[in-house]
DNA sequence: GCCAACGTTGGC
DNA sequence: GCCAACGTTGGC
């Protein structure tokens, strides 16, 4: 079981939006970055846990926890010529892009802001701090527990 | 809305 | 295979 951080712009898709999906579950599609794709395709497995992060807002923050309910499979939105995630190089035989399914789990009691993460001595090596643009990032067990605690949740 | 960082593309 | 041009992300 592994830990991840998934970023999303809440104006596009928020943690509450996930909560309001049927079965609180949604496809995590549209990722078009190769490093993030590799995580989706190769490493992210059902049962893994996700820090749900809101980006591109005045106070970016981790707001909740989700879980992976289906591991990497081809992202069919790349095959839809009318869709905004269409990739003309993708085909059913060579999907290129992958997605997973995620399910809402629980909100943090208080959100953990990027500012707080940057200010915490244990969290300075997170890609969020060092390479902010990567939209899907691995999280260590220590980072996971630190952020859970900062968010007001008890141990796993 | 600006702009730095950085990933991708394409000419050579 | 280099690297300049370009596009995108995301903090501020």
Image: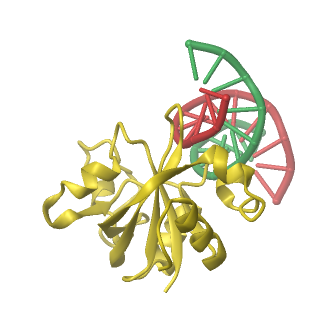
Chain colours: A yellow, B green, C red
Q: Residue at x 54, y 36 (%)?
A: A59
Percent across and percent down for residue A66 are: 37, 67
Percent across and percent down for residue A56 are: 51, 36
Q: Quadrant of residue A45?
A: bottom left
Percent across and percent down for residue A127 are: 68, 59
Q: How many marks?
A: 0
Q: Is residue A1 above or below residue A20?
A: below
Residue A131 seen in render: no
Q: Quadrant of residue A124?
A: bottom right
Q: Residue at x 13, y 61 (%)?
A: A22
Image position of A81 (left or right of B9): left
Q: Nearer the viewer, residue A18 or C6?
A: A18
Q: Is residue A153 above or below residue A114?
A: below
Image position of A86 (left or right of C5): left
Name the outermost residue toward the bottom.
Answer: A1
Q: Is residue A117 above or below residue A142?
A: above
Percent across and percent down for residue A90 are: 38, 60
Residue A2 seen in render: yes
Image position of A64 (left or right of A75): right
Q: Residue at x 35, y 36 (%)?
A: A11
Q: Nearer the viewer, residue A76 or A103?
A: A103
Q: Nearer the viewer, residue A53 or A106?
A: A106
């Amino acid at each position: 079981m592994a830990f991840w951080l998934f970023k999303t712009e809440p104006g596009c898709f928020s943690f509450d939006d996930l909560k309001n999906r049927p079965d609180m579950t949604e496809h995590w599609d549209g990722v078009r970055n190769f490093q993030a794709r590799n995580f989706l395709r190769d490493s992210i497995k059902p049962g893994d846990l996700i820090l749900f992060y809101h980006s591109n807002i005045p106070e970016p923050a981790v707001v909740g926890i989700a879980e992976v309910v289906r591991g990497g499979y081809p992202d069919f939105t790349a095959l839809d010529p009318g869709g905004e995630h269409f990739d003309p190089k993708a085909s059913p035989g060579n999907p290129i892009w992958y997605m997973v399914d995620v399910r809402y789990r629980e909100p943090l009691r208080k959100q953990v802001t990027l500012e707080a993460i940057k200010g915490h001595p244990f969290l300075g090596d997170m890609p969020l701090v060092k390479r902010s643009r990567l939209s899907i990032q691995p999280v260590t067990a220590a980072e996971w527990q630190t952020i859970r605690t900062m968010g007001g949740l008890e141990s796993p």
